Amino acid sequence: MPLRRFKKRIINIYRQRSLQLATATLAIIFLSSSGVYYFEKTAPDSNILSLWDSVWWAVVTMGTVGYGDRYPVSSGGRIIALLLIISGVGLMSLFTATIASLFVEQRMKEGRGLETVKEKDHIIICGWNQYTENVLIGLTTYGSMGDTPIVLINELSVDEIDSFKLKYHKYNLKFLRGNYIHEDVLLRANVKKARFAIIMADLSGDHARERIDERTTLTALTIKSIAPQIKTIAELLDSENKPHLRRANVDEIIVRGEHVGSLLASAVNSPGLPRILSNILSLGDSNKFRRVDIPHDYAGRTFRELFLFYREKHHAILIGLLKDKKTMKLEDLLSDNTSIIDTFIREKIRESKKDFFYDREETRFLINPADDHIISGDDFAVVLSSAISI
């Protein structure tokens, strides 16, 4: 178990039940040491000569260490010693049992996905399908997330989750069981402190396939109503549902199979091109499309100069430019029709009573601009590179 997780678990233990045990322990030590000092201070041949000596003796006796450097010789002192030995053994046993039970309880909660996540700046993955593991591999094995916590919310069986945890034991994974559409489940995942939320087309529960995109939309709306600042990425099965996700203010929308037609056509028009694109997008290939910051001293310079900089300094190919631009508010995306989804969104926003209408950042991109195109200070570079960080 990583040291950081062990420290958190110990902190939780002390916050819950150890306060009562600590109070009882201190009370017994205080009473027994005071009583022994009272009897021993006037006893002949006593080796407990001060209150500190009696406290030392009480702690050593209760801890069953038994150094023997201090001990009572009077009858009253020995009676107190007998009471301390009996109560000390029982208290230490209770303390050990409490620690063990809390560890077992915590493990059971983790196994059932019932714990509450306390992580910050983490990634939440809602739902599960045959591609979710690839997403996880991309974030961990071939990604740059490091020890960033990843919280999985789905309805897989305990056995499936256990085998999955064993397979990826070296990564900081958390599992929550429940229907992530519900606000309480997302709050248990600490969505307010999360950095990203990925909503998969969920096939893990007993849900009708034709309603999967609807669940994705409602989940995105719930997440944005709780944490408007979180970046959301959603997977759709049907491209016709894109407008609903845009109204829910989703940052990135991935439609399954959306570009199959163009890839098949390119196999005819440009043989070999689909294979190249597939290699670049595959998890195992080192060369990837990456979004990177542009050096400040290149603002105001030309695209050609920036292209040569990345090629010569980083052995990377500059493909184009990206710009995050605030364009509109969520209320501008709501249509005037009376569809069920739009009506639900309006009602949800009205019930939340939160500042949900904030400016949305929309990404604008420019692929292969002219050589004399001027770089702006708020541009990002899109490069094809084998280096994770440039």
Image (cartoon, rainbow, N blue to C red):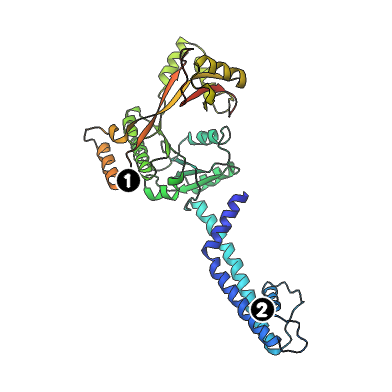
Identify the image quadrant of residue 82. Answer: bottom right
The residue sitting at 53% across, 62% down in the picture is 15
Vertical relation: 304 (above or below) 162: above
Identify the image quadrant of residue 153. Answer: top left
**Residue that mark 2 sits on:** 85
247 with respect to 48 (left or right): left
Q: Give the amino acid at mark 1.
A: Lys
**Residue that mark 1 sits on:** 354
Q: Give the amino acid at mark 2.
A: Ile
The residue sitting at 56% across, 56% down in the picture is 9
269 with respect to 305 (left or right): left
Q: Nearer the viewer, residue 275 or 18?
A: 18
Q: Position of residue 144 (x, y in %)?
A: 57, 34
Spatial distance from mark 2 to mark 1, Cα to Cα? 59 Å
Q: Nearer the viewer, residue 167 or 17?
A: 17
Residue 104 visible in the shown view: no
Q: Secondary structure at mark 1?
A: loop
Q: Position of residue 359 (x, y in %)?
A: 35, 35
